[in-house]
Image: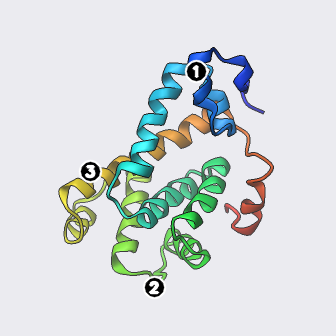
Amino acid sequence: MARIPYLDVDDLGEEDKELLKRPINLHRALVNSPGAARNFGHVGSYIRYGSKLDPRLRELAILQVGYLAKSDYEYSHHIKIGRDFGVSDDDIRAMITESEGRNSGLPRLDRTVLRAAREMTEEMKISDETFAELQKHMSAELLVDLTMVIAFYNAVVRLLGSLEIDVEDNYAPYLDEFPLT
């Protein structure tokens, strides 16, 4: 159970109602601080709609963070979102395989993006070797965006865990499909 109340549109002032146009539990908790919710949304919107980073690679990186952090909420949401952006069930299984230290057979860039997400999550930075490999495939702009995605979602999983945000019932089946170990 969440540590703070989930608010609904009717609980908000007129100027803040748009913050719950997607009334998922994370947003319903964040609107306890409308300014924080608004700015959180700006970064999230840039990542999803403004960045030139390949959306499938973005979602693989986010799934890797959620999986490593054992964040039921983030992981379940991004299984669904990832599918919307081209992540296949085989990709999700491959991410799990890579997390276990085995070669999944994914293309080199995909595996390098997953490794970068693991390194940032576990070691707090991307290693020189992994960064050099990413530079072979990505511009400086894309490298910044990928690093921002991984950093932002590492912050998100910590926020979700600290506030104990509940997974909505309609996202729970994703955890049955691809359990966190």
Query: Residue tagged by mark 1?
Result: 16
Q: Is residue 114 above or below residue 155?
A: below
Indicate which disc residue 105 carries. Answer: 2
Counting other residues with Cα less than 10 Å from the Cα at mark 1, is it few (<14), some (14-19), or many (20 or more)?
some
Q: Amino acid at mark 1?
A: Asp
Q: Residue at x 68, y 35 (%)?
A: 164
Between disc 2 and disc 1, whose residue precedes?
1
Q: Position of residue 24 (x, y in %)?
A: 68, 40
Q: Residue at x 59, y 56 (%)?
A: 78
Q: Nearer the viewer, mark 2 or mark 1?
A: 1
Query: Could you say which is closer to the camera, residue 124 or residue 74?
Result: 74
Q: Amino acid at mark 3?
A: Val
Q: Position of residue 42 (x, y in %)?
A: 43, 35
Q: Is residue 174 above or below residue 152?
A: below
Q: Is residue 150 visible to us here?
A: no
Q: Amino acid at mark 2?
A: Gly
SS class of the residue under badge 2? loop
Counting other residues with Cα less than 10 Å from the Cα at mark 3, is it few (<14), some (14-19), or many (20 or more)?
few
Indicate which disc residue 122 carries. Answer: none
Counting other residues with Cα less than 10 Å from the Cα at mark 2, is it few (<14), some (14-19), or many (20 or more)?
few
Q: Position of residue 75 (x, y in %)?
A: 61, 55
Q: Residue at x 49, y 27 (%)?
A: 38
Between disc 3 and disc 1, whose residue precedes?
1
Q: Is residue 25 above or below residue 122?
A: above
Q: Is residue 148 left or right of residue 1?
A: left
Between disc 2 and disc 3, whose residue precedes?
2
SS class of the residue under badge 3? helix
Q: Residue at x 27, y 59 (%)?
A: 127
Marks 2 and 1 sit apart, C-alpha to C-alpha, by: 46 Å
Marks 2 and 3 sit apart, C-alpha to C-alpha, by: 26 Å
Marks 3 and 1 sit apart, C-alpha to C-alpha, by: 31 Å
